[in-house]
Each structure stands twice: as C-alpha cells, then as structure tokens.
Amino acid sequence: GSAASVQAQAAKPIPELVQKNGKFALMVDGAPYLILGGQANNSSNYEGALPKVWPAIKDMHANTLAMPVAWEQIEPVEGKFDFSFVDALVTQARENNVRLVILWFATWKNTNPSYSPTWVKTDNKRFPRLTNKDGTTSYALSPLYDTTREADKKAYVELVKHIKAIDGEQHTVIMLQPENETGVYGSARDYSKKADALMAKPVPAALLKKYNKTSGNWNEVFGKDADEYFHAWSIARYIDDIVAAGDAIYPLPTYVNAALKDPLNPDHKPGSYASGGPVYSVIDVWKAAAPHIELLAPDLYTPTSQSYEKTLELYARKDNALYVAESGNRPVYARYIFSALGRQAIGFDPFGFDYTGYSNHPLGTTKTGIEMVKPFATVYKLFGGMDREWAKLSFESQVWGVSEPDDHTDQKLDLGPKWNATVSYREWQFGLRKWDPENRNGFPEGSDTPSGGIAVAKLSDNEFLVAGLNARITFGTGEANAKKGILVDRVEEGHYEAGKWVMSRVWNGDQTDYGLNFAGEPVLLKVRLATYEQ
Ligand code: N0T
C-alpha cells in the first residue's frame, strides 16, 4: 500500500561508497550506481547559465552532472549565506532526471584561492599565503592556519546543512568534492618560519605507520621527499578536518581530485606539478592523513594511451576506488571509458560539458555544441540503459575493459579458466586489415584516430555481456577448455529496459564467424559460449 511505499522511500539510505571482497560500489538509493557524468565549465555555476547546461547533459546521455558551488557565491559577505543557486541546481537536476556531484571551490581551485570570497583572498593577515623558498609570497594560501581552515569549514558545513535540508530524502546530490586540484605550483611547500618549525617536529604517528618508519623529524624520516610529503600531509589534514565536520551533519561520500604528476616521468620536481595535491606518489600520505575522504581521483588531460592507462592503473587500488573526476573532452578521450570501467571505475566525468560556447582547447576539443558532445554520447548510450546493471556486475561479478591503444595493437582479455578473448582494431569484415573493395591498401575511414573499446561483464560461467565500439572481439578457450573446440553458441543483440534484457535480434553467420565486430554505433551483445569435443 501507499503507507508502505512512503515508508520505503523515507528509508532510502544516504549515498555511500562501500567495499566488499576488494571491490567498490557507489551505493545510491541502496544499489550500485555508475556515474556517467559530465562536468560543466568553471563559470556555469549560476542560475543564468543552467539553461545552457541541461541540453548538453541530455545530449550526452549523462546520468550525473558535476557542478561547482563557489565559496564566493554562497558567502560573499562573511557569515551571510546565499543558497539560491544550490536550490535552483537541485530543483532543475530533478526536473532533468540527473544526479549531482557538487564541487566545493574554496581554499583551492587549481591550487588558487580565486573562488574564495574577496574578504578571504585579499586578507593575507588573517588568511596567509604560503612563502616560497626564496622568501617571496606565493599566490596560494597556506594550509597551516586555523583561521583559514575554520572559515572554509564554516561555509562547507553550511553548504552540507543546506543540502541535507533540501535533499536528505531524495538524494539528488550523490557526492561532494571538497576543493579542486589542491597543492601549489612553483614551490614544494610553505617555507615560512611556522612551516619550518613544524617540519622540525616529529612526523605524526599515523604517517610513520603508513610508511613503516621509525620516528624523527620530517627531513630525517623522508629525506628528499620531506617537503612534498609535509605539504601533502598539511593540505590533507586541513581538508579531512573540514570533511569530518560535514560528515557529522550529513555524510555524503567525498573525494578530492588531483592535477596529475606525469606517471611516466617520476623525476619531475614538486612545484613543476601541483605539490601537495593527491598525485600518485603521495597517495599513501593522503590516505594516512585523511581517513574521512572516500577516494582520490585523477584529472586526466594527457591523451596518449600509455600515460592515460598508467594513471588509471595508479589510482585503481585496493584502498582507492577509481573515479575519473575529470578527463579532457577531445574525441580521443571518449574511448577511455572502456578501460576505466574495466578497472572497476565507479564513474567517469569528462570536463567541459555545457553549451556556453567555451572550448577547452588544447586540454579539450576545439569544438563546442553537439560536435563536442557526440563522441561521449555514443559511448554513454551503450551503458545508459544499463548503468545500474553494469555497476552491480562490476561490484558483484567480474568485469574487463580495454581502450584502443595509440598504436592500435591487439589486447588480450583473460576471462578466467575457461575463456579468453582478443580485442583488435581497424579491421574490415572477416577480420581483414588494410583492405576494402575501393582501396586495396586502406584501413576503415577515420580509424587512424583511435576510438575503439570493449567492455565485458561476466553474467554466468559461460555467458558475457559485451559492449563495444570500433573494435572486434574474438573469443578463445582458456586452460580449462584447452582440448575442446569453441562455439560462439548464441549472440543476442539487445538492450536493458528497467533492469530486464530485451533482445532485438540474434547474430550469426558473417556477424559471428570471424569474431564479433563493433563499428561506430553503440551495440550491446549477450554472448553465450560453448565447446564441442574434438
Ligand atoms: C582542470 C580544468 C578546469 C597536459 C582545466 C586541469 C578544472 C580543473 N584543470 O580546464 O580548470 O576546474 O580541475 C589542469 C591540467 C593541467 C595541464 C595538463 C597538461
């Protein structure tokens, strides 16, 4: 009856990041959720801009919008709060049937205090900037002052209170990102007297334990890494304190995003990248310092597959759920959704999705409008109908996924003891490469730019869900089936509707004899494998 359903609704649990058997799920309304996100541009956080945001999110087939809320906009005058934008955002998100990730732009936004209110960013006395090694004053605020942290915390807590008040039942807001790309450029840490004094003190026990070190001051324990570790620790403690205060009111999952350090050049000096932010080499510092932050997430703006995949690998850890907090929006980035999902990502959130006319080139595409959205829409369409199903399979079963590497080489999927698969690219039908009737040397048109990918989820021992684009998958027998012949027994093309598989046709003959070929349109297959004695 209606009384029971009202009760069931009221009992909907708050979003939560859970871990079971080494796998993660972002639980939304009690079930695993996959963020197929889009992040709006930096200045779209005003009611007047929202009409240009929703159409892009809709065209993208995104189920989640990541949107900044700026400290300067909610507390322009100290102690006076204005949540009119948050109200409009949440109301319109519901009308548009999307969830929200709210980004708290405050003490750090790309390391800069630009989004903090004027009364903060102009008052060095009360909210000191850090001191560079040469004694000059940095643009960035120091994490070492209670005044700054308490002011940021007060505003964050008001924001969380407000979200709870308007959204505590409905959970349109599913995650919070405190700050944005923390750290500092041009310096490894704060070199003020205050900082030096703290560096001369013993390293905190939690950090010693994490690194299995015996006590000493920062330089004694961490040597050449001491400056960066100290800054990372200081920022992480600062944010953890803020998040703990928010959690006490309404404990939404939180994550911090990283302006990355080049994963292929570990020798780069802190300060040439954002020192103190959660770059891969200080993930352990952050984990020890910030137990209230659910995860650390990469902002991916390097398009090469070697670099992108390496960063995904570094952030998908037993103690860290993978979430692509930002990614460039050039077409080549869209295919990385497949490898992110294969690494059990809880979501993907490329940057720059609205129709305000801003192009993020060279970090993103030169295109605006639907042209910018299209490559991502194509991939999201694949997962859109089955975001919940995928998230559940990723959490409870097994998933795999690969994106086309820059050099287009084949990739192997180890699907367990019975099966494996090879994923290949740039092929014509029958698995032919470099051939077509008109041009005997040609690859398929446009295939020099990598765009392919395959994601596989295990449905049962012999049954797999396969989502693909511009790629071919060829199944083979694993060790347990080594002496047997393989049959691609049944291949159904279809989609999910309200959690149920709906078949549209069966693939056979040319569609299955040489592997399963995915072209430029999103196609979802349910594949049943079998063997015969030979
Ligand atoms: C990102 C975005 C936005 C290969 C850039 C990326 C967003 C912020 N910063 O459009 O500003 O708010 O998080 C920094 C990328 C560094 C350059 C990488 C070179």
Image (cartoon, rainbow, N blue to C red):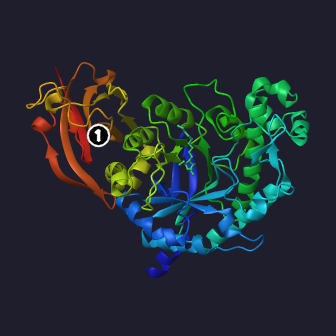
Asked if residue 483 lies left or right of residue 461, the reply is: left
Q: Position of residue 501 (x, y in %)?
A: 27, 54
354 to 284, vertically: above or below = below
The residue under label 1 is 463
Whether residue 90 is visible here, answered yes or no, is no
Asked if residue 308 lies left or right of residue 86, the reply is: left
Residue beneath the point at 88% across and 38% down: 198
Residue placed furthest toward the left: 437
Q: Quadrant of the C terminus?
A: top left
Q: Position of residue 36 (x, y in %)?
A: 43, 53
Quadrant observed for ligand 1 in the rendered image: top right
Q: Quadrant of residue 418?
A: top left
Looking at the picture, tell me which residue is in the foreground, 426 or 524.
426
140 to 151, vertically: above or below = above
268 to 169, vertically: above or below = above
Looking at the picture, tell me which residue is in the foreground, 526 or 303.
303
Looking at the picture, tell me which residue is in the foreground, 228 or 18.
228
